[in-house]
Image: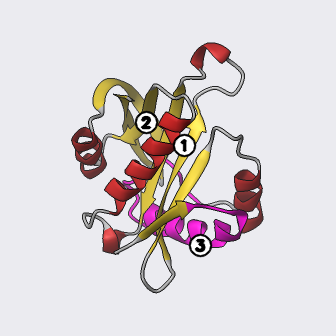
């Protein structure tokens, strides 16, 4: 069982350890390397009141996943109803309900803060994530061809959207 809570800047190092584990797979993210812990902490401190990161903490107190909700555009009021999410879960707990629990927390936060839509970009090679988001109610709405180059491998990004 995991606990879901809002991240604080004290979670930055643990979140970057999760991200490093995701990056190791080379197909789960367009991110090639994590950020220094102090940069991740600064990102968390800089979130607007309408943005959030939720962490999943296991019974031993270890962060095993997180999900970010960022404004799709911080400068365009016409898109203030749209949020962009990102999900990062360690391999050991994938398929165990962590993503679903994170999404429930993110969705509840989004509803409370006036969002009407989520978008996400998922690597085409990451069929597991595409299937997960489809189960959550996302639908594919486009594709960016040859968008990602990670460790010499070119991949498309699949655009998916979800209406709250």
Q: Residue at x 40, y 69 (%)?
A: 90
Q: Which residue is mark 3?
A: 14
Q: Residue at x 71, y 64 (%)?
A: 9
Q: Quadrant of residue 140?
A: top left
- Indicate which disc, 3 or 2, sits on the residue closer to the N terminus: 3
Label 1 and label 2: CA atoms lie apart by: 10 Å
Q: Residue furthest top?
A: 78
Q: Position of residue 62 (x, y in %)?
A: 50, 79
Count neighbours of disc 3 (C-alpha within 10 A) and say few if under 14, some if 14 to 19, many if 20 or more. some
Between 157 and 128, the one nearer to me in the picture: 128
Q: Secondary structure at mark 2?
A: strand
In the image, is residue 28 above or below residue 136? below
Q: Which residue is mark 2?
A: 120
For residue 128, side relative to residue 114 (left or right): left
Choose mark 1 or mark 3, whichever is in front: 1
The stretch in magenta equals: 6-33
Q: Is residue 19 magenta?
A: yes
Q: Position of residue 4 (x, y in %)?
A: 47, 64
- Indicate which disc, 1 or 2, sits on the residue closer to the N terminus: 1
Which dot marks residue 79?
A: none
Label 3 and label 2: CA atoms lie apart by: 23 Å
Q: Which residue is mark 1?
A: 69
Which image quadrant: the C terminus? top left
Q: Is residue 29 visible?
A: no
Q: Is residue 13 magenta?
A: yes
Q: Secondary structure at mark 3?
A: helix
Q: Is residue 50 visible?
A: yes
């Amino acid at each position: 069982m995991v606990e879901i809570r809002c991240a604080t800047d004290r979670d930055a190092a643990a979140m970057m350890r999760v991200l490093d584990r995701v990056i190791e797979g080379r197909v789960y993210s367009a991110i090639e390397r994590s950020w220094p812990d102090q940069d991740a902490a600064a990102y968390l401190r800089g979130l607007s009141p309408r943005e959030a990161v939720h962490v999943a903490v296991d019974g031993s107190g270890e962060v095993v996943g997180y999900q970010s909700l960022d404004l799709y555009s911080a400068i365009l009021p016409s898109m203030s109803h749209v949020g962009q999410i990102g999900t990062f879960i360690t391999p050991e707990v994938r398929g165990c309900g962590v993503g679903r629990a994170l999404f429930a927390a993110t969705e509840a936060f989004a509803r409370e803060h006036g969002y009407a839509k989520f978008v996400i970009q998922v690597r085409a090679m990451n069929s597991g994530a595409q299937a997960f988001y489809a189960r959550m109610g996302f639908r594919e709405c486009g594709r960016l061809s040859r968008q990602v180059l990670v460790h010499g491998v070119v991949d498309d990004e699949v655009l998916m959207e979800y209406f709250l």
